[in-house]
Image (spheres, rainbow, N blue to C red):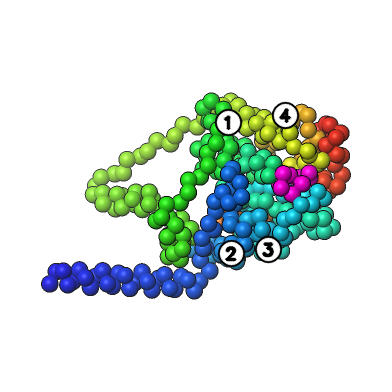
Amino acid sequence: MAARALAFILLGLGALLLSCELLLRLLPVSSATLTGYHLDPLILNYPPRHAWTSATGWDLRNSYRNLANNAGYIAHRDFKHDTEAVALIGDSFVEASMLPPAERPGVQLEQALAGRPVYALGLPGSALLDYAERMRWAQQRYGIRDFVLLLERGDLRQSLCGSGNVHGPCLDPDTLVPRIETQPAPGRLKQWLRHSALAQYLFSQLKLTPQRLWKQALEQARPPSEAPAVKAAPPLAPASAQLTGQNAVAHEFFRRIASLDLRRLVIVLDTDRDAIYAGRPIGNPERQVLITQAPSLSVQWVDATPLLMQDYARQGLSFDVGPYDKHLNTLGVRLLMEAAARSLRNSPSAAHQGRDLY
């Protein structure tokens, strides 16, 4: 009798899971991106021509159907050998899959450049040293000599190994020695879960993880009288150590791109947008670190701070996708890409060595 009851329970549970799976397949749940080292052993990207859905949160906000181009990036055009094209490089700020395709940075930069081809090479979870590899690859494969880098404020520290935002090259956080930290290939279970709409909803939309579920189970199993142990926060690295690490990353980045045949390099730096909204003073140490470590390259610097401050003082409009997503929205992208286009047009060739500040 007990076995029969258990069988009915398992059958009912299976039917529930199957119903959830079928229902979620009708909704725009994020689907498998299948990222991997498809075209280069140090560069993570999507399979060329792969199609998938992206969405945000439990209520599937900003859902879009994405299609990777011939090079494995979400871009509005295929890439081909073109020495007059511009490569726009960064992380999810460049990919911008939460924005309508026509409002993403690659499209907006191309419009600001009056139709000059822009190749958007953006992928989430990457950092500054990954961008150096993409620059190398774009030049070797497509002859690109003009580059625009869209940097978020964490791109320096995230280039330290173990940050969770490294696709290949990184610096050891203790010794600051360069090493390679590629992402492991998915196991069979993960490969299966990638194709389950229910699994994608739980892990991509709700951000559930086995560690989080186990922690919640332990907390619920604890007797009410037993207070949970308070875990001490890990000590922050001293400011001097953080600065040393950022300087080392910037130095390594410019060392890696020094051998490239660069014509123009524009670096756009995001800012503390929350400070702009609150009217707080804004420091930008990352900008100074990068400028200090680029003594022999002709670099145009686009600092988002004055651009966004002026626009916010005039209109009072946010530059964020929303309170749930701190990526740049269409307005923020437009302001920065228009500034990058002006800087790219006005910048001298890299043959004229020096530092030109926007």
Q: Specify whether 67 is left or right of 21.
A: right
Determine the CA span between mark 4 and mark 2: 42 Å
| CB-based contact (under 8 Å), mark 4 and mark 3 | no
Of mark 3 and mark 1, the one earlier in the sequence is 3
Q: How many marks?
A: 4
Residue 334 in view (yes/no): no
Camera-nearest label, 4 or 2: 2
At label 1, the amino acid type is Pro
Of mark 2 and mark 1, the one earlier in the sequence is 2
Determine the CA span between mark 2 and mark 3: 14 Å
Find disc 2 in the rendering and name its residue.
Answer: 51
Q: Tell me the element at label 1.
A: strand
Find disc 1 in the rendering and name its residue.
Answer: 178
Q: Tell me the element at label 2.
A: strand
Find disc 4 in the rendering and name its residue.
Answer: 292
Point out the stretch of residues depicted in magenta: 138-150
Determine the CA span between mark 3 and mark 1: 36 Å
At label 4, the amino acid type is Thr
At label 3, the amino acid type is Pro
